[in-house]
Image (cartoon, helix red, strand yellow):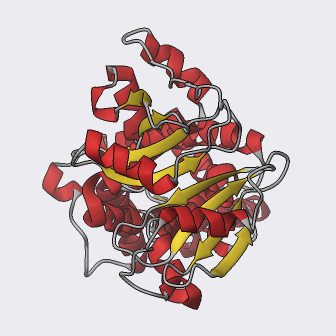
Amino acid sequence: MFGDQKGGGELVEAPRPATARDAKPKRKNPQQTSFVAQLHKWAGLTLGIILVICGLTGSYLAFYPEIERATIAPLRLSPGVQPESYEAVYQALSKVGSPAEGRWNIELPEDGGVITSRYGRRGSPNRMVTLDPATLQVVHDVEWGSTVSTWVYELHYRLLMGRSGATFMGIVALSLMVMMIAGIVLWWRSGRNVAARLKYHANGTSERKIYDVHRLSGVVGAVFLLLILATAAAMSLPDQVKPILSAFSPIEKSPEPESSPALGRPRIPLDRALAIVRQDMPGVDIRWVQVPAEETAPYAIRFRDPGELNRRFPKSYVWLDQYDGRVLAVQRETQGTASNRILNLFYPLHSGQALGIGGRALVALIGLFPLILFVTGVIRWRGKASRLSAYKRSTAAAAARRTAKS
């Protein structure tokens, strides 16, 4: 039962089946089966697909304006052309969507070209209307959610789950941060020096190469992915983040000024409102203007201060009385409280706008890392599971043969 005997009565060990020896996995380090390892594995297998979706959609959104211009011909009309009058632009838009039913937000393109605007009406999706600045003709008219870019945005931000989706994605972002930190801990506790941890074994087995790609992708992308996930969680969970920040620094609310009573006076032209801002606040870059639709509503003009990181959607505003052009209130992002400035940092950091075109390119590149990590992680998991299954079958077969011999 325990071995064979030779002529001299010497007891020798029976040879083990080669399949059992070959199939048995190498002895694992204790931490590989620890709680941290299990957390990293199962979080990656369950939540990893969401991270892949967010990464790929984030890569697209980093350059969606350029992608839209490249794929939608009307958006390439009249490059560099500025309209003769923004009041005329507003009048043209008013024929498309009545100011009595909704508000118009008009974007002022930095380098000229088509003029994009948003028409918001209660109970309806935002309408996005684009005009040719030379002819003031509508060249593109769509609703939010009906285009590739807006669908991708909803998938990225809410996973197509509506308002509750934002909260869900915030929780997922926090969970993914835990998963990534667990992976970093496992990498750091591997017991090797830094050079060995960062080495890629080009001549290794395919299994070793897969592991190296997974490990190095995680290490290289960890800092950036953690920053992106942290800002995503902060933007998705504002009700939880704001009380934390306000404990250290107050959060100032945006003013809500009103225009003086009309008293029979007409609204001043949009061009005059823009001229007042440029005269009173030289050096600012006006990005958007909301034209008042109600009698007491003011002009709300959104501008970018020098040094402000939010480029297309800055957080600085000036409100003007729609009848006499008086400045009613000013909110400058660069002069906000510490908490306000931190809140305003989340989007430019998340989107890469804080570093300009280079930052956006980096975000687009980092968005591919979750796919690499997920694919290599699944391959490693399936390989380990396959070897373990083969080892168990081999062990069971060897045990059965020994039992039969006895």
Up-down: is 292 above or below 253?
A: below
Counting from the top left corner in percent of width and height, residue 406 is at 75, 58
| Circle count | 0
Q: Is residue 230 in sight in this rendering?
A: yes
Counting from the top left corner in percent of width and height, residue 239 is at 61, 23
In this view, the residue in front, 172 or 247, is 247
Q: Quick one: which residue is furthest to the bottom in this view?
A: 73
In this view, the residue in front, 63 or 402, is 63
Counting from the top left corner in percent of width and height, residue 283 is at 22, 49
Q: In which quarter of the image is the N terminus?
A: bottom right
Q: Is residue 6 in sight in this rendering?
A: no
In this view, the residue in front, 195 or 390, is 195
Residue 379, quarter of picture: bottom right
Residue at 36%, 78% (x, y): give it.
Answer: 205
Counting from the top left corner in percent of width and height, residue 227 is at 38, 44
Residue at 65%, 32% (x, y): give it.
Answer: 262
Q: Quick one: which residue is furthest to the top in this view?
A: 247
Q: Quick one: which residue is furthest to the right in this view?
A: 123
Residue at 78%, 56% (x, y): give it.
Answer: 125
Residue at 58%, 74% (x, y): give it.
Answer: 19
In this view, the residue in front, 270 or 355, is 270
Up-down: is 152 above or below 100?
A: below
